[in-house]
Amino acid sequence: MRAVIQRVSSASVLIKDQTHSEISGGMLVLVGIEDADSDDDISWLSRKIINLRIFDDHEGVMNKSLKEVNADVLLVSQFTLHAAIKKGSRPSYTRAAKPEVAIVVYQKFLGQLESNLGKKIKTGIFGSKMEIALVNDGPVTIWIDTKNKE
């Protein structure tokens, strides 16, 4: 699994010019799923996201986690995070899981995040064409790959 995490002061998902979901602050999480992803990947990534200390404490130091500040999450599936661009100019998405596999992993991941955070998480609609609007706070943007845990 790959995730791009952005600390945001606001984020929203529009589908067919209608606001589907929005948060006023917290994290926008874009997640890409591949066939090799397992329950271990889901569990590890969920814990990492919930406990990542990227929110400011009272001294303005990034020292607080999502759970500690009780912020919201907007989770959006994004298969293009698995784009391969080694040759040519057109990205290949063969590493991304097929929709019938990815939806199951995505739903498990959503459930794990909600369980770990202790509240509902806003989402896009899996497989839909979406417009994502965000105000990146900081900016803070972090890329995580469960197959490369650096």
Image (cartoon, helix red, strand yellow):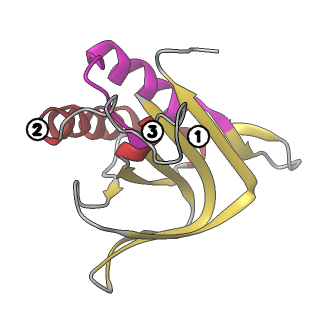
* Residue at the extreme front: 88
| Image: magenta residue range | 31-53
Residue type indicated by callout 2: Glu
Dot 1 or dot 2, earlier in sequence? 1
Q: Gap in Å between the C-alphas at discs 3 and 2?
A: 19 Å
Residue type indicated by callout 1: Glu
Quadrant containing the N terminus in the rendered view: top left
Per the image, the residue denoted by label 2 is 100
Q: Answer left or right for 143 relative to 28.
A: right
The verdict on residue 120 being magenta is no
Residue 132 position, x and y percent, is 46, 68
* Residue at x-position 32% and y-position 57%: 123
Residue 121 position, x and y percent, is 34, 52
* Residue at the extreme right: 59
Per the image, the residue denoted by label 3 is 83
Label 3 vs label 2, nearer the camera: 3
Dot 1 or dot 3, earlier in sequence? 1
* Residue at x-position 86% and y-position 50%: 60
* Residue at the extreme bottom: 17
Find residue 88 and name its label: none
In this view, the residue in front, 117 or 43, is: 43
Residue 71 position, x and y percent, is 53, 53
Per the image, the residue denoted by label 1 is 68
Dot 3 or dot 2, earlier in sequence? 3
Q: Gap in Å between the C-alphas at discs 1 and 3?
A: 34 Å
Quadrant containing the C terminus in the rendered view: top right
Q: Secondary structure at mark 1?
A: helix
Q: Answer left or right for 20 relative to 45.
A: left
* Residue at x-position 33% and y-position 13%: 40
